[in-house]
Image (cartoon, rainbow, N blue to C red):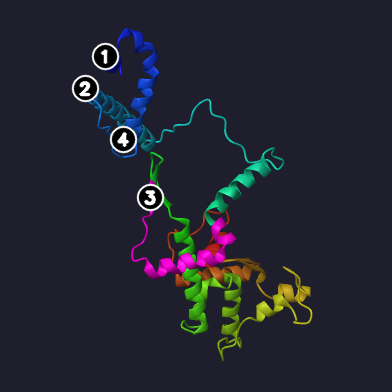
Amino acid sequence: MHDILDMMPESIKQNKGRTTLQHLSEPWRCWKASIPGKVPPLPIRIENRIVRYVKAKADWWTSTAHYNRERIRRGATLESRRFSPIPFPPLAYKHDTKLLILALERLKEAYSQAYNNPHEALSRIKRNLLTQRAFQECVIESMDLYSHLIPVYNVEPLEKIADAYLDQYSWHEADKRRLLPAWINAADSEPPPLLVYKWCHGINNLQDIWDTNEGLQRASDMTGLPQTSNDFLTFQEVIIEIEHPIRLYCRYIDRIHMFFRFTAEEARDLIQRCLTEHPDPNNENIVDYNDKNVGHVLHAWS
């Protein structure tokens, strides 16, 4: 920059300094975007000065980026000390409606033509599917967070609409022709809870799939009669409650919670059975409780 200013006469140096910086910023932006920024009619001396400026600034920029990347790798942060955190949007925000309208408009611009004129959009989609032999370019940009890179893909809206239409059409026609077996749900038409319910219902309908001759008695006691089922974690009678060690039972998604109540004799028998199956002469598997019996019981039922 100083070399270029030194080449100017004193009369125009003050007025042309800012303009010169603006012209120098253009090749710098071209360098950052990895596109050529050469202007053919420039004199060789001016072009050499511009190349020197861009090279010096590029060296500074890359060295700063590598320095910050190394700092972040070691655990440092780049937050500004004068920065105040952005709070969660309040319920009564002044510009809520305007911001929502702007966001919807930004999303609607790409697809408004397909909504306003669906017949023309369908014609364009089918014409592209018939005639296009190569995919359009997908622009990929990387968001550099110094610690890692996040790829950002930019796909043409018409490409997205064509892909979505082709997907819906293929699944619809395949479903009509029974191309896929019944256990493949076209386009995920059923929510997972309903699919799980149907799966369990199908298991229950299998012949002799459950053998309950010697089990599930306690489950029936805790559930109650079909006509008068028990409330959650309750029994109809105290006698039914105390006749079995399992007092409470609850399943939450993939976890089972059970509450046991053992007598002293049952606890000793349980500990003995556990030690018979898994000898532990050095008491290595006992949970560190004050009462060793409790530790043995918890280990036996873990």
* 247 with respect to 280 (left or right): right
Q: Whole-percent x and y of residue 197?
A: 61, 76
Q: Reading the chain from its start, which is encountered first: label 4 or label 1?
A: 1
**What is the spatial separation of the Cα atoms under label 3 and label 1, in whole angstroms?**
42 Å
294 and 208: which is toward the camera: 208
Which residue is the site of mark 2?
45
**What is the spatial separation of the Cα atoms under label 4 and label 2, in whole angstroms?**
20 Å
- Tell me the number on the disc at residue 7: 1
Dominant secondary structure, magenta: helix
Task: Check disc 3 and report its element: helix, strand or loop.
Answer: strand
Which residue is the site of mark 4?
31
Q: Is residue 179 magenta?
A: no
Label 4 environment density (alpha carbons within 10 Å; few <14, some 14–19, many ≥20): some
**What is the spatial separation of the Cα atoms under label 4 and label 1, in whole angstroms?**
24 Å
**What is the spatial separation of the Cα atoms under label 2 and label 3, in whole angstroms?**
37 Å
- Disc 4 vs disc 1: which is toward the camera? 1
Q: Whole-percent x and y of residue 246?
A: 65, 71
**Residue, x 49% and y 66% (percent of image)?**
164
Task: Check disc 2 and report its element: helix, strand or loop.
Answer: helix
**Residue, x 44% and y 33% (percent of image)?**
77
* Amino acid residing under circle 1: Met
Which residue is the site of mark 3?
140
* Amino acid residing under circle 4: Trp
Magenta range: 112-141
Q: Is residue 292 visible from the viewing direction of this image?
A: no
Q: Reading the chain from its start, which is encountered first: label 4 or label 2?
A: 4
* Amino acid residing under circle 3: Ile
User: Looking at the image, do the residues carrying marks 4 and 2 touch, with CB atoms under 8 Å apart?
Assistant: no
* 145 with respect to 88 (left or right): left
